[in-house]
Image (cartoon, grey):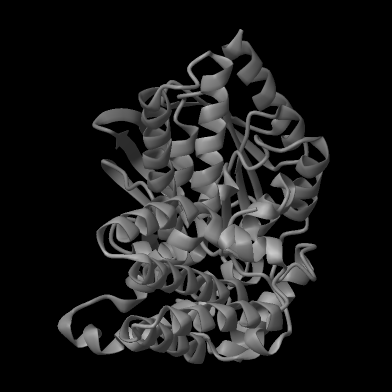
Amino acid sequence: MIALTGVAAERGGRRVLSDLDLTLTERRIAIVGANGSGKSTFARLLNGLVVPSEGSVTVDGFDTKSRGKEVRRLVGFVFQNPDNQIVYPTVAEDIAFGLKGRGLDKPAIAVRVAETLDRFGLTGMDDRLAHELSGGERQMLALAGVMAMAPRWLVMDEPTTLLDLRNTRRVMDAVAALEQHVVFVTHDLDLIAGFDRVLVFEAGSLAADAAPAEAVAAYRAIAG
Amino acid sequence: MIAGLYRPGTSPVHRARAGIKLAALLGLGTLLFAIADPRLAAAALVLTMAAHGLARIPARVAFAQIRPALWILGILFAVQLWLVGLDAALLLVLRFATLILAASLVTLTTRTADLVAVIEWALSPLARLGVDVAKVGLAISLAIRFIPAVAAIVEEVREAQRARGQDRSMIALAVPVIIRLLKMADEIAEAIDARS
């Protein structure tokens, strides 16, 4: 469970979110809102990349301010641009990156990497250079690199924005197959039809919190 | 293609341990600066090219490693020729060409993770002095990983400037490239934080 209590957040000295009291327990939660509405900051609050200026955020009881390391083990994060998330030059090396920090030995890392490659349709790409992959493959690699760490929650910040229709479907199919709780930030309202809960942000506040159909209607009304 | 990045293979050079390749590179570098005969330096260059052949690195890939340095080598040759003489000019250029090709051979045939592991091992005594060896290794892997990314940004910006008729302005190229690199650095730091 992720709990936000009396949360406000600032970025660059400017308040971008305020008055958030929420409990997240659903498996599929979507976040929508206009540019600058605070949804990316909200996503970053959930794994401690941004800590609240007021109130608290806890993930399974761990406070993001004081227990950031534990929180980041529980909450994986996929960014919009996979190019800035892939750290090593080749596919297998990048998936192994996070695992080294978990104290796994070489054989255990190799097994986990092979499993992850297979699971995300990257089998046989071990030694491919990341910059030579297609946009869709790079986003799958970014997702695979995070999922290799077996987080309990996954936060995705507009992961399909840079992708074409086919690769968007590929990423969404991979997301649908995940057992984890997923918090999915997007501008694409077609992608969230099957979600359990949708949060709509407007000018730094939560404007709607409902099932997809109702939330999308509320968002359209706000957007005019 | 971007020069110097790992090319998978099963050749003896690929299979050799990263530590041995780095030690050989260090040894070759020392030897090259100890010899004074350009014929020996030329022999070292031929041997290095033969090692590329053994690693089954195509000639065009091998040439791509040294092509960006050709103009510097040309200037060095001309200056040495003018100031010292033909032997000294040949020796200098052969030394640098051999070193560039040998270093490229190591990166072309060795996974970055293996190189980083050796470097971290070599630096491990410094951990007692408070040096974060893992961070040094990460910085090296990031430098290698983002060579093509930086090249792509420069090309994108150059294209955009050309489209606006600014194809000769260094400032028009440098400012957006630097801004994008700084933004990218912020995002990479955030991603590493999220993945660690």
Looking at the image, residue B164 sits to the left or right of residue A91; the answer is left
At x 42%, y 68%, the residue is B90
From the viewer's side, name the closer residue of A25 and B91. B91
| Vertical position of residue B71 compared to residue B57: above or below | above
In which quadrant of the rendered image does the C terminus of chain B lie? bottom left
At x 48%, y 62%, the residue is B144
Q: Percent position (x, y) of residue B18?
A: 52, 86
Is residue A67 at all visible to an observer of this figure? yes
Is residue A60 at all visible to an observer of this figure? no
Looking at the image, residue B131 sits to the left or right of residue A82; the answer is left
| Vertical position of residue B146 compared to residue B180: above or below | below
Q: State the residue lying farthest toward the right.
A: A166
Q: Dividing the picture into quarters, in which one does residue A144 lie?
A: bottom right
Q: State the residue lying farthest toward the top.
A: A224
Q: Percent position (x, y) of residue B193?
A: 40, 58
| Vertical position of residue A4 compared to residue B56: above or below | above
At x 57%, y 88%, the residue is A106
Q: Dividing the picture into quarters, in which one does residue A36 lie?
A: top left
